[in-house]
Amino acid sequence: MSAVVFPWLWAAFTVLASAAQTARNAMQRSLTETLGTIGATHVRFLYGFPFALIFLGLVHAMVPAKAPALHGTFWLWTLMGGLAQIGATALMLAAMRQRSFVVTTAYTKTEPVLVALFGVVLLGDHLNGYAWLAIVVATAGILLMSWKPGTEQSMRPALLGVASAALFGIAAVGFRGAIRSLDTDSFVLAATTTLACGLGIQTLVLSGYLAIADRANLVAILKAWRVSVVAGFMGAFASQFWFLAFALETVAKVRTLALVEVLFAGIVSGAIIKQATSPRDAFGIVLIVAGVAVLLSYG
């Protein structure tokens, strides 16, 4: 798969994806009050899938390349990414019910640190001194934001957020693997094909689960279609640009630039959700961002 593009195009895709994802997360967070964590998670897939199909149809109409063959390796990568993203989204929304929107977003931005650790354990990657320092700093930020004197359950949202970040990292690796495995000259076609297939898998898995385990919730999701359609569109729109960025650049660089989402979340938190971020939380966010930035700049 090859493409002649502007070298900064992946960065533009990443910023657009971050902004759209922040809006989508805020919408999903409000849906947790009525649909619960699983229901709000399913909204992004069920209502995003039709838009992904529309995107794919438009790409096929505009791009002359032939549709790539969907082989076994592609489906394995896509399945890994899709299932990991389901778990990541559910954990993120669960954390948001216990802590502020901006703080939970900061927790999920520890993803690059966790990906680095996965590389050491699973792939034998080497980390230099700067990388380990960055991990310590980011971890200190998490602990600072999580620990509250006299609050026994203060670690729960931090653990949920970090677990969400880990699964988001696995999902990103899976989806990039799927995109890169397709034999096509169009990175746009490869990314959009992977998006449609990934959302299709996620829609089938969660719809099937809810049909068996919580049919009333599935009915409630369908009834909440007016709000859910907007959230679904924003989710598909964000994912489209994430996948385009993954097609052009490494996951590490994309997720580093994605730290701008913490700033977007701060704007949303103050202007829309009206939740206050304490000085302790703000300093913790600074430590996390600094740690991740050092890791991916010098590590």
Image (tube, rainbow, N blue to C red):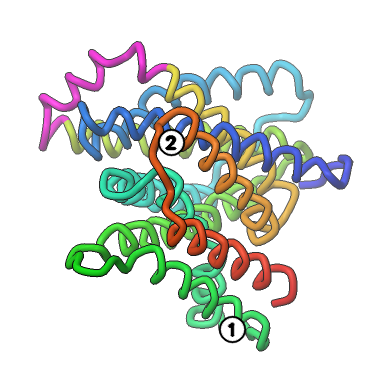
Which residue is at a point 48% across and 54% down the rendered structure image?
106
- Please count the marks in the image: 2
Residue extent of the magenta highlight: 211-229
Mark 2 residue crowding within 10 angstroms, few (<14) / some (14–19) / many (20+)? many
Q: Earlier in the sequence, mark 1 or mark 2?
A: 2
Q: Whole-percent x and y of residue 22?
A: 51, 36
286 and 243: which is toward the camera? 286
Residue at 34% x, 62% y is 158
Label 2 sits on residue: 25
Amino acid marked by disc 2: Asn
Say left or right for 39 vs 28.
left
How packed mark 1 is, by other alpha carbons closer than 10 Å (few <14, some 14-19, many 20 or more), is some
Q: Residue at x 36, y 20 (%)?
A: 228
Mark 1 residue type: Trp
Q: Which residue position holds label 1?
A: 132
| Label 1 with label 2: CB-CB less than 8 Å | no
Q: What secondary structure prevails in the magenta region?
A: helix
Left or right position of 232 against 2: left
- CA–CA distance between discs 1 and 2? 31 Å
Q: State the image coordinates of residue 77 (x, y, percent, origin top left).
A: 50, 53
> Of the numbered discs in the image, which one, if any, rests on residue 184?
none
Q: State the SS at label 1.
A: helix
* Residue at left offset 19%, top offset 68%: 150
The quadrant of the picture occupied by the C terminus is: bottom right
Across and down, in percent, residue 29 comes to 34, 34
- Residue 79 can be seen, yes or no: no
Whether residue 190 is visible to the viewer of this picture, yes or no, is yes
Secondary structure, mark 2, is: helix
The image shows residue 91 at horizontal and vertical percentages of 31, 51
